[in-house]
Amino acid sequence: MINGIINLKKEAGMTSHDAVFKLRKILHEKKIGHGGTLDPDVVGVLPIAIGKATRVIEYMTEAGKVYRGQICLGFSTTTEDASGEVVEKTPVSTELTEDAIDQAMASFVGEITQIPPMYSAVKVDGKRLYEYARTGQDVERPKRHVTIYDFKRTSPLIVKDDCCYFDFEVACSKGTYIRTLSVDLGKSLGFASHMSYLERQASAGLQLEDALTLSEITEKVAQDDFSFLLPIEYGVMDLPRVDLTENQVTEISFGRKIALDRTEEQLAAFYQDKVVAILIPRDDLYKPNKVFI
């Protein structure tokens, strides 16, 4: 059995599920999962867990994300991105300033409330929102609280054809819809808008510059080169770390609690630079929630 983490560069035109399906065929492994869904049109880092590493997927999903993309002020779409049909047009004049946009972007930093787009995988009454959207139904969508750590413009403004385009970078918590953030930014400036491009730069400690495409992975497997497999430790990189003694490792291997001078809700426990368990607090002690030894 193959075990480990893959830093996959998902290309446009495929779903995260498509990527997992193709990797199962390439690696001849059934036990594969992904850590954080990417929309079909979005490219970038998609963490993949294989074999025993699938036990840490939930911690990879919890991790914060970094995206780079482009916002278009001037018209909105059904999907909140460039793939949808135009819903509303609000011509942009040359009077719009970079300062006004920068101030508006800064106002979104912190905890914000989002309403997921209709074309999303969020479930309402057992059905995905996109299933309602495809049949023309509009349902009440659940609000969600997310955190924006940084949101900034990274290019000059380009005004053409009554629209204004600019690049951006955003660091955010899990569950953030960048499409919706783009639309809400436009509303705060008084314009219809959408996200015209997006790529995920980082997720679960993995960086885009180190990611491999499916074709690159296929070539390596054909050469019996599995150097692209990262150890399971990459799946817990965003959790606080604690290094245990040999005696503490023995205790948690039997499922016993141990005393630690820590206050975190979750800890990645290491011994000799290998993750041995995920610990959670219980009765002023820490108990193993998952054990990897």
Image (spheres, rainbow, N blue to C red):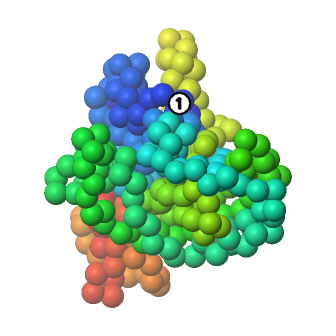
- Please tell me which residue is depicted at 76% across the width and 43% down the height of the picture: 160
Q: Nearer the viewer, residue 233 or 238?
A: 238
List x then y, in percent, for residue 119.
Answer: 37, 47
Q: Nearer the viewer, residue 268 or 265?
A: 265
Q: Identify whether 83 is placed above or below 241.
A: above
- Please tell me which residue is depicted at 40% across the width and 64% down the height of the picture: 115
- Please tell me which residue is depicted at 48% across the width and 47% down the height of the picture: 87
Q: Identify whether 155 is placed above or below 96.
A: above
From the image, tell me which residue sits under label 1: 12
Q: Is residue 146 visible?
A: yes
List x then y, in percent, for residue 32.
Answer: 34, 35
Q: Type of residue at label 1?
A: Ala
- Please tell me which residue is depicted at 28% across the width and 81% down the height of the picture: 282
Which residue is farthest left?
125
Q: How many marks?
A: 1
Which residue is farthest top?
222
Q: Nearer the viewer, residue 207 or 83?
A: 83
List x then y, in percent, for residue 15.
Answer: 41, 34
Q: Is residue 38 visible?
A: no
| Location of residue 248 (image quadrant) | bottom left
Q: Is residue 254 left or right of residue 88?
A: left
List x then y, in percent, for residue 293.
Answer: 34, 52
State the SS at label 1: loop
Image quadrant in which the N terminus is located:
top left
